[in-house]
Image: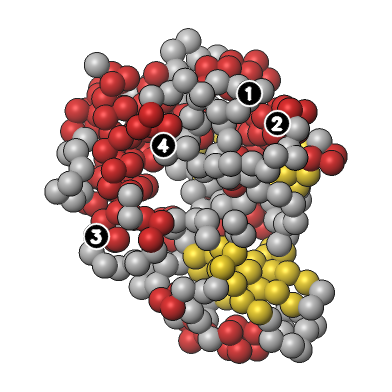
């Protein structure tokens, strides 16, 4: 299945108006062909195909204000600052804050070319390729966490990151609660009672997954890392816990395994435990018990999905990919509860 499709009716925009604005940054006269990326459940992502160049446009969901995960200016700033010191970030082109053009902020960047692996991988991907994917994913996260965080100093809210995250995600879950998912109070209470102090403060991605990475298997590494909307300055082990919420091992129970959206269960991929061990060894950090970070990651992912599920239930989006999100929230909350039983 192709990663791009025709633009959904509800997500269309005035291509001519965007192109006219964009001509101030690129020297191309012809209007682009516009397609929409299937992936991505939060911000909307489009492919602009020019004859000799492909660009990617990012915008918030229709009707969303520029807050938290939908702040295009923030997302653009993070990647612009990171690019010189972390080259796996895509090259930014321009940020538009003129709402007369699209009704919201949006930005454009160069498309990073290369394979993106999702739930299932092509047969031609070898065992060596899988090893490269695993190694480069762990190494890339360690490298990101080693970047000097002062380049994003305005995002650093100081000590207490773990506490703020527990409080913030708990509030979001309660605000998005629907009558067909667990209330989550047991998990939220446990996280609040067991939160550790911050172990460090560094730049974190917030959504580090195989399917957010463009690989360059020919050269044994990563061509680019995508989806920086949740990036900030915070605790690296919280970032690792968030990443591993998506990591399905080959022996996981069917309900959790059904949520798999990346090929983490293949032979040659590390288990969650092996991922943590290798990360700690490479980063030089210590963690005697990873349970808190694992539970937090599961809960945080449940909140992200629940926020989308609430919009779907309210008819604010008709994307059919969201039709099973209520079931996914139930699975994640129950799994988190099982970790603390």
Q: Residue furthest right?
A: 219
Q: Earlier in the sequence, mark 4 or mark 3?
A: 4
Left or right of 70 in this view: 215: right
The answer to whether mark 2 and mark 1 are in CB contact below 8 A is: yes
Q: CA distance from mark 1 to mark 3?
A: 38 Å
Residue depicted at x 73% and y 28%: 127
Number of the label disc, if any, that sits on residue 205 = none
> Residue 258, labelled with which disc?
4
Q: Which residue is mark 1?
A: 267
* Left or right of residue 57: residue 30: right
Instruction: Report the residue at 61% width, 76% height from top.
Output: 34
Report the disc number at residue 313: 3
Q: Bin the neighbour count of mark 4 within 10 Å (Cα to Cα): few under 14, some 14-19, many 20 and up.
A: few
Name the residue tied to disc 2: 130
Circles 1 and 3 in contact, beta carbons < 8 Å: no
**Compared with residue 20, is residue 279 higher up or lower down, i.e. above or below?**
above
What residue is at 48 percent from the left and 86 percent from the top? Answer: 100
Whether residue 306 sits left or right of residue 272 in the image: it is left
* Disc 4 to disc 1, C-alpha distance: 18 Å
Q: From the viewer's perspective, is residue 224 above or below residue 75? A: above
Label 4: which secondary element: loop
Q: Earlier in the sequence, mark 2 or mark 1?
A: 2
The residue lying furthest to the left in this view is 179
């Amino acid at each position: 299945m192709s990663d791009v499709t025709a633009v959904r009716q509800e997500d269309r925009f005035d291509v001519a108006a965007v192109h006219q604005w964009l001509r101030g940054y690129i020297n191309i006269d012809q209007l682009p062909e516009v397609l929409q990326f299937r992936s991505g459940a939060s911000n909307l992502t489009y492919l602009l195909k020019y004859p000799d160049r492909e660009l990617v446009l990012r915008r918030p969901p229709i009707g969303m204000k520029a807050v938290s995960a939908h702040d295009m200016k923030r997302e653009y700033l993070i990647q612009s600052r990171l690019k010189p010191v972390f080259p796996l970030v895509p090259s930014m082109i321009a940020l538009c804050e003129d709402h007369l053009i699209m009704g919201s902020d949006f930005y454009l960047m160069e498309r990073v070319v290369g394979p993106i692996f999702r739930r299932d991988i092509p047969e031609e991907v070898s065992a060596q390729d899988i090893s490269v994917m695993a190694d480069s994913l762990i190494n890339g996260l360690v490298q990101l966490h080693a970047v000097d965080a002062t380049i994003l100093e305005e995002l650093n809210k100081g000590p207490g990151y773990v506490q703020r995250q527990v409080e913030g995600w708990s509030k979001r879950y309660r605000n998005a609660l629907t009558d067909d998912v667990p209330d989550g109070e047991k998990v939220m209470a446990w996280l609040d009672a067991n939160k550790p102090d911050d172990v460090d403060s560094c730049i974190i991605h917030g959504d580090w997954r195989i399917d957010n990475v463009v690989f360059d298997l020919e050269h044994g590494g990563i061509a680019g890392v995508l989806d920086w909307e949740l990036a900030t300055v915070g605790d690296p082990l919280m970032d690792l816990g968030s990443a591993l919420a998506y990591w399905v091992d080959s022996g996981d129970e069917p309900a959790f395994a059904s949520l798999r959206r990346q090929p983490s269960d293949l032979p040659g991929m590390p288990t969650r435990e092996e991922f943590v061990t290798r990360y700690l060894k490479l980063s030089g950090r210590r963690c005697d018990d990873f349970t808190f970070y694992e539970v937090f990651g599961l809960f945080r992912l449940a909140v992200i999905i629940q926020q989308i599920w609430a919009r779907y239930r309210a008819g604010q989006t008709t994307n059919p990919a969201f039709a099973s999100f209520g079931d996914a929230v139930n699975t994640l909350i129950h799994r988190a509860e099982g970790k603390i039983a």
